[in-house]
Amino acid sequence: MKLKSLPSSEMPREKLVKLGANSLSDAELLAIFLRTGIKGTNVVALASHILAEFGTLRALLAASEHEFCQIKGLGVAKYVQLQATVEMSRRFLAEKLERSNALTSPQESRNYIRAKLRDQPHEVFAVLFLDNKHRVIRFEELFYGTIDSASVYPRVVVKKALERNAAAVIFAHNHPSGIAEPSRADRMITDKLISALQLIDVKVLDHFVIGDSDIASFAERGWV
């Protein structure tokens, strides 16, 4: 069926204007991004096919240029546009976080950190540096690879905290396995970092472990 044959209430753009973006399915949102279909396939059907190929919208957004361009109807121009859209979303979350208080708006912190770390192909250890009112100073990715006592250096974290004039920090790292449950190594390095930062009066507020769909909080478990 051609897209023009659909009732106006079922056409993605018109539906978004009338009901809002959250009323659209993943395929309908992607169809708006694609704008046009290909010969013999309308844009909504093409979007559905692309999502079926990748499995999920998230997998599509995280695809490499090569993976993306293997799909008929897609190309480098669309890949660039999509990555620009993803980055704008991340920057929007960053702006919201920078205007908030990390403790009074904990969900803002989680949303931003999840967006930054969840789809990384390897483990990334990052720090959210906060001032004495717990406002965000800066978010930095500091260490890469397997997170353990051998790869996360307390002296580097202390140095960065001093450079940023931070009064508090929130740690975060991802588990590429998708399982957010903290490991014994996670707890050990967190304890070492807490001890090191106590020497310069910097408080550790939390340590988030990012999985596919969950985030584990050390503070919620009483570990910090």
Image (spheres, rainbow, N blue to C red):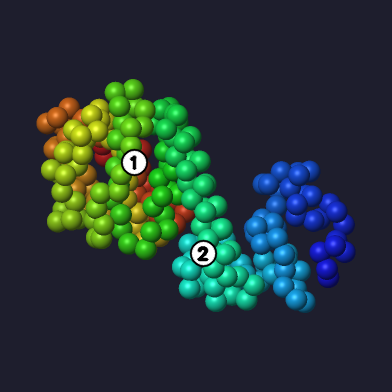
Q: Quadrant of the N terminus?
A: bottom right
- Residue extending furthest top? 133
Comparing labels 1 and 2, the label whose residue is closer to the camera: 1
- Residue extending furthest front? 77
Q: Is residue 127 above or below residue 53?
A: above
**x and y percent of residue 4 in the render?**
85, 62
- Which image quadrant for residue 178? bottom left
- Which image quadrant for residue 60? bottom right
**Do we see residue 56 in this rendering?**
no
Mark 1 residue crowding within 10 angstroms, few (<14) / some (14–19) / many (20+): some
Front in this rendered view, residue 205 or 156: 156
> Which of the two labelled residues, at mark 1 and mark 2, occupies the earlier sequence position?
2
Q: Amino acid at mark 1?
A: Phe
Q: CA distance from mark 1 to mark 2?
A: 25 Å
Which residue was labeled with disc 1? 139
Residue 109 is marked as none
Q: Which residue is pictured at 54% across the width and 73% down the height? A: 69
**Do we see residue 75 in this rendering?**
yes
